[in-house]
Amino acid sequence: MKGSVRQFVLVGLLVIASTAGLFYLMEAIGLLPVQAAVQAVLVDRVFNLYFFLIAFFYSLIAVFVVYSIVVFRARKGDLSAGVYFKGNSPLEIVWTVVPLILVIGLAFYGARNLAQVRAVDPGAMVIKVTASQWAFNFEYPELGIKSRELYLPVDRQVLFRMTSLDVIHNFWVPEFRIKQDILPGANLVKELRITPNRVGNYKVMCAQLCGGAHADMVAKVAVVSAKDFQNWATVQVNKTVKDPAVRGKTYYTENGCASCHSVDGSRLTGPSFKGLYGSQVDLTDGTQVSADAAYLQKSILEPNAQIVKGYAPNVMPSEYVKVLTDAQVNDIIEYIKTLR
């Protein structure tokens, strides 16, 4: 009996030592990127708990197996049969009840952390995110700024309101930890709250396979001081362009038009914009229409109303009527006019 107790104590000490070593190793090799948001700290609490449990259960199994092989192996010349036993009811009850309690406890722990991750700050800055194949575009409604790069003030919560122009995308900055799918449809606005707490440069990437150039769908994320953010915002406001054609070129790029409509005459998914304005366009219903401003406006806002001959219907998203303002549509048309 004393020998059995001594063996259990020894195995217990080996399990503790193995758990500590494995947990330290996982911490030392840096499995996770740096924490750059308040939410990352909360998420990493759960990760660290899981890392500890992984180390513990691996050690619990591996130590018992290795110890049994070494200590209880058959000695040379020992051909006797092992002791027969049917089972151990107390042990079976323990390894059923303990995991059940552990899983329920983890569920409550995860739910509490999730509530903290989603905590609402009434002073959060709103940023609209528009995803398309294959780019992110950011709009700061409070400042009247649009950008292809994401600038965030440190230690201030940001509320991202996100939508997609075409397929399912995903917003993910690894240093912020949490991510969110972005669904197509103007009414399917997904929200994500982040409070950056570390100044630095990062990258937002699409974590949802979204097409041929998925790997290139990244954008710069700069977390800066409040003063530097204000300076950046001032520069962006002062860069406001007065030429409608130049603005239209920007909207053409920001809203994913370039992925389907070329400006050099080459054939893509949709008709090229080069030489389009003022030309005669053949439609699939056999009629012909002049590509004037009214036609172009209708083609942008009602893309399936008049399908150009030789092109498939229901390809261009119909969400631009809700995404683009009348002024932006007019600027795009002014840009198309310059593509002679």
Image (cartoon, helix red, strand yellow):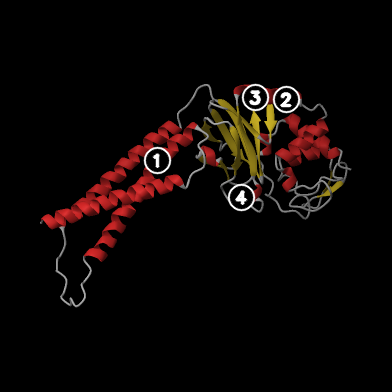
Instruction: Single out the mark in the foreground, 2 or 4.
Output: 2
Q: What is the CA distance from the residue labelled 1 to the residue labelled 3?
A: 33 Å
Lower sequence index among marks 3 and 4: 4
Residue 228 image offset from top left, x and y in percent: 65, 24
Q: Is residue 166 visible?
A: yes
- Identify the image quadrant of the N terminus: bottom left
Q: Which mark is residue 235?
A: 2
Please identify the residue farthest to the left as the structure is shown: 1
Q: Which residue lies at the image location 64% right of the left edge and 43% below the top edge?
A: 218
Mark 1 sits on what residue? 46
Instruction: Report if the CB atoms under discs 3 and 4 are less than 8 Å apart.
Output: no
- Please provide percent x and percent y for residue 2: 11, 55
Whole-angstrom CA distance, mark 1 to mark 4, is: 29 Å
Q: In front: mark 3 or mark 4?
A: 3
Instruction: Point out the tag, 2 or 4, that comes first from the N-terminus.
Output: 4
Tell me the tag on residue 210. Answer: 4
Question: Mark 3 Cα within 10 Å, few/some/many (few <14, many 20+)?
Answer: some
Q: CA distance from mark 2 to mark 4?
A: 33 Å
Spot occupied by residue 39 in the image (x, y as percentages of width and height)? 47, 34
Mark-to-mark CA distance, 3 and 4: 34 Å
Q: Quadrant of residue 75?
A: bottom left
Mark 2 vs 1, N-terminal side: 1
Query: According to the image, label 3 marks what residue?
Result: 228
Q: Quadrant of the C terminus?
A: top right
Q: Quadrant of residue 293?
A: top right
Give above or below for 10 relative to 338. Answer: below
Tag 3 or tag 2, which sits nearer the N-term? 3
Q: Residue at x 38, y 39 (%)?
A: 110
